[in-house]
Structures are given as C-alpha cells and as structure tokens.
Image (cartoon, rainbow, N blue to C red):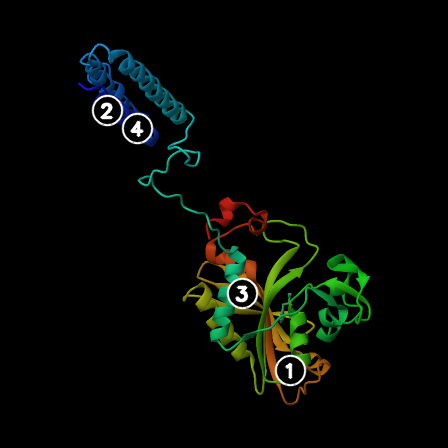
Amino acid sequence: MALSDFLKQLDEFSASAVEAFGRCGDAGSLESARIEFLGAKSGTLRALQKQLGTLQSDEKPQGGKRFNEVKREVEESFKTAAARLESGESTGGAAKGPRFDPTLPGQAFDIGHLHPITQTIEELKDIMGRLGFSVADGPEVEDERHNFEALNIPLEHPARDPLDNFYLSVAGKDAKGPLLLRSQTSTVQIRVMEQTAPPVRVISIGRVYRPDTADATHYPMFHQMEGLLIDRHVTMADLKTVLRLFATSYLGHDVHIRFRPSFFPFTEPSVEVDMSWGDGWIEFGGAGMVDPNVLQSVGYDPEQVSGFAFGLGVERLCMRRHRITDIREFYRNDVRFLRQF
Ligand code: PHE
C-alpha cells in the first residue's frame, strides 16, 4: 500500500472516531463506538495496524510515527468522552443534568383552589342572585351608629358590652365615638338603606367578630349572610318563602323550615330560623320583619314600606352541606382538610 493512501486513511479514521466519541450521549453508545474504532480484534485501528505492515520498509518509519500519533489522539478523545459521561453531561456543550426522558409520566402541578368558605360564599351569592338579590358590602371596622344605634340597639343594651365586642382603641375620623370590629352584618342593612331609596333587595356576606372562645361550634371570627328586602306589603310569608327557596337550592330538597319566636332590637317580630332534613333541627340564624324604628332611622316611611331581614351563619351552612363537625377546621389551614373541597 502506498504511504500517501495510508496517511489519508489515518486522517479519516481519526476524524470519524473523534466525531463519533463526541456525539455519544450514554455509556452504551460510547462502548459500541469504542469497539468499532479501538476494538482489539476487529476495530478500525487494528485494521490500520495491519495495513502498516504492508508499507514498503523505507516508508514504515514515517507511517508508524503518524499511526502512533493518531492512536494517541483517538484514545485521548475516547477518554474525554468517557469522563464527560461520568460527570453527567450528555453531549459536548449541552446543559448539565440528567437527560430528558419523554416516556416518563408527566409531573402534575398542584394548582390549589379556593377556600371552602370562599366557595360557599360564591355559591350563596349565585343562589340569592337568582332570587333577585344583588350583593352589597360594608366595612369590617364599624362605628357604633351602624353596628348599634341605627339598628335600634340603645346605649344601655347588653349587646354593646365591651366584653362582648372587639372595640378598637383608635377613634373614627368622621364617626362619633369608638370604632369596633362589626359583630354582625346587619350593619350593611343600614349602609344600604342610607344610600338607596326603596325598594331594596340585597344580600351581604362577610366577616363578623365576637370575643367567643373557640370550640367546635364557635370561633371569634366567622361569616354571616345578611338578607334585606324592603318594598310595599312585604310579609313574613315572603321571608319564609325566600329562606325555603334558598335552603332547597343550597342544601337539598327535603328541607323543613321552622321559625321560633325570638328577639332582635332591629326586627319585630323576630324569629330564630331552624332547618331540618328529618334528622333534628339545626339553628342557622335570626330573622324578622324590619323594625319601624330602623326604617325611620334611615329616613324610610314605615307607613309606606315594610320588609324582612335575616342573618345566617355561613360556616354553619357549609358545615351542614359537607358534614363538617368542627368550625376550627376552616381556619387551621391544614391542607389535608382544605384539599377535600
Ligand atoms: N344580626 C343577627 C345576629 O347576628 C341576625 C339577624 C339578622 C336577625 C337580621 C334578624 C335580622 O344574630
């Protein structure tokens, strides 16, 4: 064989072996490439070594020198590729880290969801919206006029006891007297009637605060849904009908509603609202016909209009729906509980 052909073959061998080792992405393919190019029995290098013997004797030293150079080059490039795979890098210049396996199952993202009470609030708004009630809002920090006075709760009334309310030490800018965290959403009745002429048909859902010790059925903060309907000739039958329609929508069809006589300063007559599914009565809140004194305090004429109001516990509704037995679960923020809704 002519020396020039031999040297050309050496160059080709070197180029393709270096290229192949550099392309290998895992130990298996590197090993096949090693056998192909450097294999002791039938690798290309071995074949070239045999060719070396066919050169004319005066060309052998030059051919042999170049052969040894190429051999070192290729072995070196094999070692580099092996070290690269060892260190976890897949191909030359590619990003570090394990190779992407498209056949593995995907990773599901935990995207979370709304808190059960928030979900309940959305659903209550939806149901009451279908009954024609729009949504009103009021502040959680209230003055005594909206939390008590306009609701016909006079100064000496026990409901205003500092031990039964969260009074704040800061004074209101415009309000006379101290501020407090509202103890009931009935405050929004006043705010709505102050701003709109009758007829009125609103609900308001939000947080209320009472200094109760937390137990399975009490929490110092909870939510109420207040309802207020003012129009001509509104009666207690309308109140019962609206509550029944609401209860069947939210809690199911075989619900019974019971009114027990009660007292609230802002309604007359007043009732406690109980519901039953044939398994005993549960109290959900209070209701009644809006007291003429309240209508007067916002400038309505009690001779012209009448109305009903109700206030239901949102947690209680949600607890009944989902058979939750401890109100504290809502506010422990334990995902094992929250994840179920
Ligand atoms: N505000 C009353 C309470 O918190 C509930 C209620 C609302 C009663 C409206 C009558 C009318 O207990």
At 79% from the left and 67% from the top, the residue drawn is 172
Q: Residues within 10 Å of mark 3 (few under 14, many from 20)?
A: some
In this rendering, the answer to whether 243 lies above or below 339 is below
Kindly indicate whether the residue at mark 1 contacts the one at mark 4 (C-beta within 8 angstroms): no
Q: Is residue 75 above or below residue 184?
A: above
Q: Amino acid at mark 2?
A: Gln
Q: Secondary structure at mark 3?
A: strand
- For the residues carrying marks 4 and 2, which lies nearer the camera in this image? 2
Residue identifier under label 2: 9
Nearer the observer: mark 1 or 3; the answer is 1
Any part of residue 36 in sight? no
**Res 111 visible:** yes
Amino acid type shown at disc 3: Asp
Residue 289 sits in quarter: bottom right
Residue denoted by label 1: 196
Quadrant containing ligand 1: bottom right
User: Which of disc 2 and disc 3 is earlier in sequence?
Assistant: 2
Which residue sits at x=59%, y=77%? 308
Q: Position of residue 104 (x, y in %)?
A: 33, 39
- Distance between mark 1 and mark 2 Cα atoms: 97 Å
Name of the residue lying farthest toward the front: 58
Question: Residue under circle 4?
Answer: 15
Q: Which residue is mark 3?
A: 274
Q: Is mark 4 within 8 Å of ligand 1?
A: no
How far is disc 1 from disc 3 in space, using C-alphas? 31 Å
The residue carrying pointer 4 sits among few (fewer than 14), some (14 to 19) or many (20 or more) residues within 10 Å by Cα, namely: some
